[in-house]
Amino acid sequence: MLRVAGAAGAAGIGAAAVGAGAVPALAAPAKAGAAFVHPGLLHTQADFDRMAAKVKTGTGLWKAGYAKLAGNPRSASTWKANPLATVIRGASGDNVTTLAFDIAAAYQNALRWKVTGDTAHADAARDILNAWSIKLTKLDGDADRFIAAGIHGYQFANAAEIMRGYSGFDLARFQKMMLSVFYPMNHSFLTNHNGAYDSNYWSSWDLLSVASVLAIGILCDDRAKVDEAVTYFKYGKGMGSVKNAIPFIHPGGLGQLVEVGRDQGHALLSVGLLGTICEMAWNQGIDLYGYDDSRVLKGVEYAAKWNLGHDVPFTSWTWHKGAPGVWEGWETFTAAATGARGQVRPIWESLYNHYVNRRGLDAPYVSEMAAKVRPEGGGGDYGTGGGLDHLGFGTLTFTRAKAIVSATIPTPSASTSASGSSSDSGAATPAADTAAGNQPQGGRGEDLAATGAGGIAAAAATGVLAIAGGFIALRRRGTRDSG
């Protein structure tokens, strides 16, 4: 898994420098008065409606995706929680896998309830979440404790978001646990990077913390935390801000993902986290997928191309590592790394279905990776190390027919409120999977970019869109349906 490391600039080393630089003064990136959409982390009610309808009729990829979910042992309604008061990662007594498996079981049972309406799965998910919110008080260990806080913070919040409003689920107590145990560690890491240079930790460390802050903010209806996560993603001082995570844009639109120079396990972790952050933000009307001329698309295409076995361009960069007053060093990377090249992770469906099927853009290498991994599993299907970094099952949850949507803010509906109430019935009446009425929307005015401009679907036919006196090139795909 991750180790203390980073990627940032050092002047005078003789290679291109990658670093944070000065952080400008910023206004809050999200609209202060906007209502939160619930459920609204990785999945909205429209997504659940689509899954339920497609699985019920045994349709294509959804059928295969649900079979993958149902076949995982942590999807059983008989799963029993094993809560701990203290979770340790990276030190003596390491027990973080216990937490990871219980989160997977809660999320997977919650999904099965939403798709089938079987309350046995809802009861299992509820009981797991309640058990942990009663007992967990501390995350401990070496520096890896921040990894546990980030990965399991965003995952726990996603499971709870699905279950909010279900009979017997103590949402208030769960929110208190997230705010007292997970968020302080996420915030501390993004603020001071465990006492190291801001460049000492690689992009995935920051991204997992950003994912957790964003998820906790949405779960807890806390606008300040959502703004914190979005601001860091755009302008943060560490390597998880998107321009530091993807520092170089090569001709042809490939963005050099900084962790590709390290090894591919961690590069793919970053890919998965970028997709997770962007999807959660999109479901709240914030387009990070399209931010900075779809910089994320360029970065994940680069990583996918390299991991498919193709050559990629590479700009040398120098990493400044260490801790102020303790030690420091520099290291220059000159080529994409071969370690763990081609590793399989369940991370591609959200990216593919957003860029290709939701927005109608070109993503040939992401498309190929999605097809290669499909149907995506999760919950330990890919091992108990990196395989638990992602919730997975994206073939079920993200597959959508091609239906290019306009980038408007989600409209609160019966499933949207500050309190997040919902019915115990689980699977809603199946909604039609059409372009109108059941697709999550995205994009606020300050987030305009290649996937975030209002009216983009019509304008994109020309191949170029004028925004704010400039031009953003758009590549359109054909009308192939995703199945």
Image: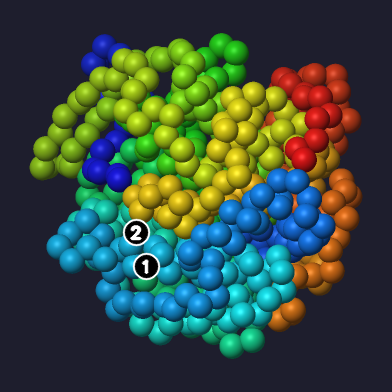
- At which x and y percent is residue 321? 22, 34
Asked if disc 1 and disc 2 are in contact, CB closer than 8 Å, the reply is yes
Q: Which residue is mark 1?
A: 99
Quarter holding residue 319: top left
Image point (22%, 50%), residue name: 195
Q: Earlier in the sequence, mark 1 or mark 2?
A: 1
**Count of number-bearing discs:** 2
Q: Nearer the viewer, residue 206 or 471?
A: 206
- Numbered label attached to residue 337: none
Left or right of 339 on screen, residue 47: right
Image point (61%, 28%), residue name: 368
Residue found farthest to the bottom: 168
Q: Nearer the viewer, residue 481 or 273?
A: 481
Amino acid at the residue labelled 2: Ala
- At which x and y percent is residue 439? 79, 51
Look at the picture and state if 278 lies above or below 477.
below
Amino acid at the residue labelled 1: Leu
Look at the picture and state if 220 lies above or below 434.
below
The span from disc 1 to disc 2 (Cα, nearest Å) is 9 Å
Image point (30%, 41%), residue name: 201
Q: Nearer the viewer, residue 29 or 254?
A: 254
Q: Nearer the viewer, residue 483 or 46?
A: 483
Q: Which residue is mark 2?
A: 148
Q: Circle 1 sits in a helix, a strand or a loop, which is it?
A: helix
Q: Circle 2 sits in a helix, a strand or a loop, which is it?
A: helix
Left or right of 56 on screen, residue 292: left
Within-10-Å neighbours for mark 2: few <14, some 14–19, many 20+: many
Rendered-image quadrant of the C terminus = top right
